[in-house]
Image (cartoon, rainbow, N blue to C red):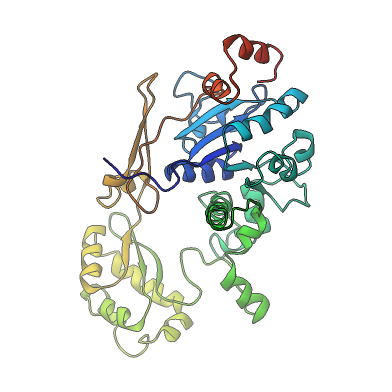
């Protein structure tokens, strides 16, 4: 019998949409929390309708699936007075530990989701709000907009190319991870003091908090920090090099690794004092890259990987996503999630630490209304049908 997961017994009620908060609560679900997502039946999470129709259900398209495994789902119209009345009842009766939302701040009062209102029914409630720019600012925000504003695009792409969006929604994911950490701290604080708390995560502040080196170097020391393609501002050689049949990525982090690289026959022409130090290589990095490219062009990718790994030089193949899921260090940890209705199976990466969890398939819109409203509030089928008819749920 497997041991209980860390957050078993913790209940999260999440008024969530898009990516950042669903990813955060997915991480909590992986740790064993009961996560119940709340949506308006008439205006549900827009991500439900994005991507391929893999199930023949318009509100279960492919883009919605990744961040919503392991959750339950109810519908509740917080724009209606009765819906706003039901929310505190749910929090009290379900003994909700964490209430989370990623609505724009101006909607908090209209929806009845303010921290002070909800903590009145459960004083030790942990309340989390993720916004683009903090609770005092109502500006709309999506990940690429924040990548631009936070300086990520200035640091991403080729030196002679335009500012470029990162290949993953890193502001969404980063704010989620920061929020996840704050929830864990709040749960610990509550366990030791009994106190609940309010957590406000600004996606902009979250993103900028990662810019420790760029901001210190530029604002503090006056250095120019900008995009370097696949290279590095302070180390050389670092980059992707074409081989006879693909690419390899090399990152030489010290002079000993450089000496080991240039001891290989393909790169022997670079041995000697001219480029023995990192400072010398950085000063003439374009010539170093050209000479390395000539050497790698004589090798196949597998040959280059074997040679550099054997010499202790950090190197990797440039993987496709198919390569990643086939990687022997990744494949055994993949999580399989199966839809009991259709039999469709999807694959997810495991959380960063621990055994891969068993997760349920992402929930349909309002899939657990009968179970949760019955469990928490004692509503039977007739009462639920009436609430649905009146567009309360």
Give the image quarter of residue 369. Answer: top right
* Front residue (pair 32, 201): 32
Vertical side of 70 occupied by 138: above or below: below
Residue 199 in the image: x percent, y percent?
65, 52
Residue 391 in the image: x percent, y percent?
70, 17
* Front residue (pair 24, 63): 24
**Which residue is painted at 73% across and 29% down in the image?**
84
**Which residue is painted at 75% across and 34% down in the image?**
111
Residue 371 appears left or right of 103:
left
- Quarter in which the C terminus is drawn: top right
* Front residue (pair 4, 277): 4
Residue 51 appears left or right of 111:
left
Vertical side of 297 occupied by 345: above or below: above
Vertical side of 1 occupied by 187: above or below: below
Residue 252 in the image: x percent, y percent?
36, 74
Give the number of callouts: 0
Q: Is residue 84 visible?
A: yes
């Amino acid at each position: 019998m497997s041991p209980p997961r860390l957050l078993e017994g913790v209940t999260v009620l999440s008024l969530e949409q898009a990516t950042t908060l669903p990813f955060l609560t997915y991480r909590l679900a992986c740790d064993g929390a009961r996560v119940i997502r709340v949506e308006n039946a008439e205006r549900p999470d827009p991500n439900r309708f994005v991507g391929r129709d893999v199930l023949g259900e318009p509100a279960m398209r492919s883009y919605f699936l990744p961040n919503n495994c392991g959750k339950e789902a109810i519908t509740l119209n917080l724009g209606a007075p009765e819906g706003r009345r039901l929310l505190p009842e749910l929090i009290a009766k379900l003994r909700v530990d964490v209430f989370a939302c990623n609505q724009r701040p101006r909607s908090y009062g209209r929806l009845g989701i303010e921290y002070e209102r909800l903590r009145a029914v459960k004083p030790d409630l942990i309340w989390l709000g993720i916004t683009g720019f903090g609770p005092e600012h109502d500006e709309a925000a999506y990940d690429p907009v924040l990548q631009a504003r936070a300086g990520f695009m200035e640091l991403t792409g080729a030196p002679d190319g335009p500012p470029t969006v990162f290949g993953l929604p890193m502001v969404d994911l980063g704010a989620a991870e920061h929020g996840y950490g704050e929830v864990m701290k709040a749960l610990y604080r509550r366990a030791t003091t009994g106190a609940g708390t309010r957590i406000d995560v600004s996606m902009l502040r979250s993103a900028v908090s990662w810019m420790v080196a760029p901001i210190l170097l530029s604002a503090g020391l006056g250095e120019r920090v900008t995009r370097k393609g696949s290279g590095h501002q302070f180390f050389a050689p670092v980059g992707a090099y074409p081989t006879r049949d693909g690419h390899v990525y090399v990152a030489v982090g010290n002079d000993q690794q450089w000496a080991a690289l240039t001891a290989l026959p393909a790169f022997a022409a670079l041995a000697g004092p001219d480029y023995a130090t990192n400072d010398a290589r950085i000063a003439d990095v374009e010539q170093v890259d050209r000479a390395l490219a000539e050497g790698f062009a004589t090798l196949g990718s597998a040959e280059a990987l074997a040679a550099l790994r054997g010499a202790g030089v950090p190197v990797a193949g440039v993987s496709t996503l198919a390569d990643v899921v086939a990687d022997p260090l990744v494949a055994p940890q993949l999580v399989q999630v199966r839809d009991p209705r259709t039999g469709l199976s999807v694959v997810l990466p495991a959380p960063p630490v621990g055994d891969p969890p068993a997760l349920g398939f992402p929930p349909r819109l309002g899939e657990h209304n009968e179970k949760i409203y019955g469990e928490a509030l004692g509503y039977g089928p007739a009462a639920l049908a009436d609430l649905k008819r009146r567009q309360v749920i």
